[in-house]
Image: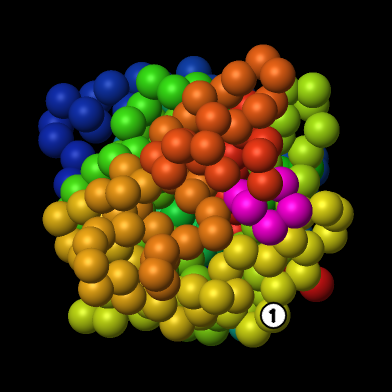
Amino acid sequence: MIFDCNPIGATMSSTFSALQVVFITALVTVLEFSANTKGQTTEGLFRRQVNCVGEVVSRNQCPVQVQTTTVGKCAAWCLQRDGCLGFVRDSSQGECHLCVATARPDCTNTQPASPGEKAYELIQIACMTNGGTSSFSGTCKCPSGFGGNGCQIQMKDCDGWQEAGYPNGVYWVRPSLNTEAFRVRCSMEWNRTVIMSRTSNTLDFNRSWVDYRDGFGDVEGDHWLGLENIRLLSQPQPYPCLVIQFTLSNFSFYIARYLGFGLSDETGNYALDFHESKCLSPPMGDCLGSVKGKPFSTYDADHDDDGGGSCAALHQSGWWFGGCTMCNPTGVMTQPADMQASGNPEEVFWKPGLDGLSPQKVEMFLKDCQ
């Protein structure tokens, strides 16, 4: 049960029941508190004061004095008192001073420690940032979309989790404080936030407008993240790069990159925008240039330029269509062993440079291409 949370100046009201106090008293009493190392973490709900080594919180910040024989009983007294954020234990006098503040980083509210004095801080305040809480297991439980040792980091996309040292996996992100958090798959070694993954033909991509807006599938496997979530990830500025990757059955892969990617909101039908295309895996060519500025369409929400019919219905997919399209990444996955496309309009294809080839896998990512 090791804590590694940085303390935060905050107020707290005691919400522990009498039963919890009895339990905590027993718990803290048997814990071993380190007395030698500055900032060394300790087990339980309190730890040794991190800031201002050799000093303790000033007496005017610790107005309540109680006679105790152990650190555990000091802790129990603190937990029972509203506003207590820590205590100074004086072993030479057998007393404990309950504090309404913790040591500031600049040490402006501390004084030199007398012999026998040691200061302790309530660890729970270190996890209260953005609604986080601490637990007996020794971890900060952060609300969805926040991370860090003290829940202090808003995880806007996979970059935040990568910078915090997390491995590949599925994480909650919160692009804006005004939005709900949602789960995304992060590929850390390539600095990618996955917005579409297709590795089999089991997930049907011929879906409704609502499905494409909100997302479908399993983010741990094949899925579409959702137009609204994709839009949020590209806000407030256009995202550095959209990457579309086709992988063939012989394991060769081709990548098209679109810099400055962004989408309009739903009132604009999630119209596609980007600054420039960069197709770095010849012979794969540019397919989205002809539909830049075009709205998204599905079989039940036709926004294409084909006045005689529905491109989404023809291609059995949801996409940005003009009249209709030179690529269909969300069409039907056929995955032929010989890589040869059938030529049917509903299958997955990318005609510029890969005409006649059918992929084994199709993925779309957002990443920093700088």
Coloration mode: rainbow
Image: 322 above or below 193: below
Q: Which residue is mark 1?
A: 276
Q: Position of residue 8 (x, y in %)?
A: 50, 65
The C terminus, quarter of image: bottom right
Q: Nearer the viewer, residue 272 or 9?
A: 272
Residue in the image at 83% along x and 53% along y: 283
Give the answer, above or below, for where 111 lies relative to 51: below
Which residue is located at x 68 percent, y 66 percent?
Answer: 286
Give the image location of residue 41, x and y in percent: 65, 39
Location of residue 60 by image quarter: bottom left
The amino acid on which the numbered mark 1 sits, given as a three-letter code, is Glu
The answer to whether one can see residue 26 in this image is: yes
| Magenta stretch: includes residue 198 | no
Q: Nearer the viewer, residue 174 or 125?
A: 174
Is residue 122 toward the left or the right of residue 282 in the image? left
Residue 299: give x, y in percent of width and height.
Answer: 21, 52
- Residue 105 at x, y = what percent? 65, 73
Quadrant containing the N terminus in the rendered view: top right
CA neighbours of label 1 inside 10 A, class few (<14), some (14 to 19), many (20+): some
Tell me which secondary structure the magenta stretch mostly adopts: helix
Number of numbered markers: 1
Seen in the picture, residue 97 relative to 203 is either above or below; the reply is below
What residue do we see at 24% from left, 25% from top?
22
Which residue appears at 52% of the width and 37% of the height? 343
In magenta, the rendered stretch is 350-354
Front-lying residue, 126 or 57: 126
Residue 154 visible, this orientation: no
> Seen in the image, is 154 located left or right of residue 255?
left
